[in-house]
Image: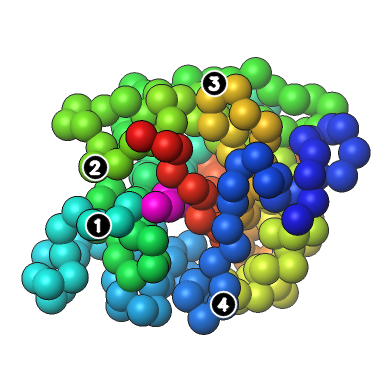
Amino acid sequence: MVGGSPGSGPTGVTMSARLLLMLTSVLSGCSEDYGLEMSKGSADTGGLPPDDTSDEDTEDSGVPEEPAWYVVRADLAVVGGVASAVGAVVSIEIIDEDFDRIDCVVDLAADRVAPGTPDAEAGLVWWDVTVQASPEPCAPLPAVLSLGVGELHPDARARLGTVEHDDIADSLYGAWLRAGAGEPTVYGYAGTAADLTGDDPAVLPPPDGTYRLAPLYVVALPAP
């Protein structure tokens, strides 16, 4: 793993953020909707919001017994060159320790999203997300998450083949995450609908548009 933060030398997946790469056998992509498909649990979350799992086996539904990880998806807009909360949608899914199920979903609307402080040096646009929701999440989550769109880190670029996006890597951005006051960490990729065509190379800072942030890694839940 590579340590660091945007704008201060090499950046990547930090040990302090306790990220765990989801191997290709566990994580496969749905290129049409940026979604994840959990191969062991056969639960296709299919984008934002995740698909309803009510028709799945009842023995494999409900709150995970051993919640351990979370993944974040978001639709976030850049307007006038700066982060905007307009139309923002954030979805946090909690996964059990064996990656078997995605059953606990916390959906956060635009009123929980605010523009964050941009990092011009690193070309990162940030949004701050207040996670505390009612009803309470089914596992501990950071009270505040910052989500960013910026440089596509080589670690994420190397994993784009798992979501069948390696051929359009030059048009995609990195999805970054910071939990509370922690260090920024790359956790996935981002792009507009037009970026998925692969016609326009990514430029920094990210231009105006609505970006969907999609995970390539799971993130460890904080201690209760």
The answer to whether mark 1 and mark 4 are in CB contact below 8 A is no
- Displayed quadrant of residue 98: bottom left
Please tell me which of labels 4 and 2 falls first in the chain. Answer: 4
**Mark 1 and mark 2: span between their CA atoms?**
8 Å
Please tell me which of labels 2 and 3 falls first in the chain. Answer: 3
Q: Is residue 203 magenta?
A: no
Instruction: From the image, tell me which residue sits under label 3.
Output: 115
Please tell me which of labels 1 and 4 falls first in the chain. Answer: 4
- Disc number lying in front (1 or 3): 1
**Mark 3 and mark 4: span between their CA atoms?**
33 Å
Q: Which colour style is shown?
A: rainbow
Instruction: From the image, tell me which residue sits under label 2.
Output: 138
Vertical placement of 157 versus 71: above or below?
below
Vertical placement of 40 versus 47: above or below?
below
Place of residue 61 in the rendered image (x, y in percent of width and height, measured from the top left): 16, 65
Element marked by disc 2: loop
